Image (tube, rainbow, N blue to C red):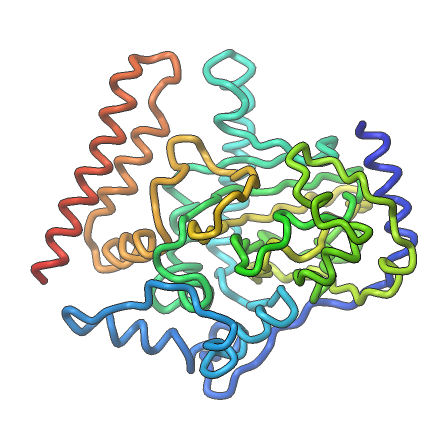
Amino acid sequence: QDEAVARRAERERALLQPGTALVAKKQKGGRQSSGAGFGSGAAPAGKAASKKKGAKRPRQSASKAELAQRGSVLAKELQSSGVVRIDGALSAATADALRDFVDAERLRCEEEVEAGGRPSTDRFANLVLLSNRCDLLLPLQGPPLDAMQELLGEASALGSLLEEVVGREASFNELACLISEPGSKQQPLHPDTPYSPTPPLYAAFVALQDVDAEMGPTIYLPGTHTEAEHTAFYGGNLEVGRDTVGLRTNVVDEEYIASRPVKLGLLKKGDVALYNQQVLHCGGANESPDRVRRQFYISVRDTRVKGVQARASIRPALLGQLTLGAVRDELRELAAGGEARRFAALHAADMQAPDGDARHEALSHERVAAISAMDSARKAHE
């Protein structure tokens, strides 16, 4: 099966246009520190709302019409092309610390799994063309949490953009790092989710080192997140794209693939590529002699879209436990010197030995629910 997938990917690779670098859009009056120019839209509004007691935050994802009327430049570009870049979303120091943590955590988790301490699925996710690739599921503590503070905290461009396009009630869906080592092959083109009128998932890929063409940057085909594009890609049959097995049975349409513009995730350390997961994309081949590409990522899911079968790369204890709004609230508490009680409870549940008393795991999740209820009651009286 892997050989057939690799052959398909190589055929597509020969057809694809050379591609140009994905670049950040600028918005007049935006935050210069973000590199993306985001800030004259949702970010200041969110910041002001946090200072005013009882102020309501947006809870529903924006419709296409709403974004067209009042959306930020980034939100409009995300709607139009399906992928945007935000420069400098993560500081170099935080990226370096997270990269070192990822390398050490990978070794620790591999040893834990090999020793029979827990199943591989608790710490690693499956990938297409797994050889020389790794999808490491990360804990909700330490350097990953520091990175989340910069990426999703109150003053962040990415956090404000996600809240604008998908709403605070979106599920915090993934927390992981993709690792592509020299020798990893190019993946076949694919969307992460089939077409639906409302995009169900958005993912943010964050470079933990500079990425050049030799290291196999992510390849995006902008604008391919629409019903018409999916229909064309799947040979006129959208149902092929709903195959839950993950196999691509559609014939490679040479004319279609050769005609689509290509953007490459040639990111600098700390830059982000945020994409609608219906966009056609793939991981490139890492043909460098000795450079590993590490790509930290998070994703959010619009839970109102039903029937999505995409597998979430997140530790089981964290799956479905947090919304985007809850994450941003918890990060704000941390930034103000408070305690992240929900994060701590979830981390405790994550570290619970899998062969321990199942009752303890249930109690851990009950504790998370209790903390959530207490937080809601406290905020209602603020």
Residue extending farthest to the bottom is 28
Q: Position of residue 313 (x, y in %)?
A: 53, 38
- Count the marks: 0
Q: At x 87% / y 63%, what residue is drawn?
A: 17
Horizontal relation, residue 202 to residue 365: left or right: right
Residue in the foreground of this view, choosing between 31 and 71: 71
Instruction: Tell me where residue 99 sits by quadrant.
Output: top right
Residue in the foreground of this view, choosing between 311 and 156: 311
Look at the image and tell me in which quarter the N terminus lies. Answer: top right
Residue extending farthest to the left is 381
Horizontal relation, residue 350 to residue 26: left or right: left
Horizontal relation, residue 137 to residue 179: left or right: left
Q: At x 87% / y 48%, what residue is drawn?
A: 252
Horizontal relation, residue 190 to residue 250: left or right: left
Q: Position of residue 203 (x, y in %)?
A: 54, 53
Residue in the foreground of this view, choosing between 64 and 323: 64
Instruction: Tell me where residue 263 sits by quadrant.
Output: bottom right
237 lies above or below 223: above
288 lies above or below 335: above
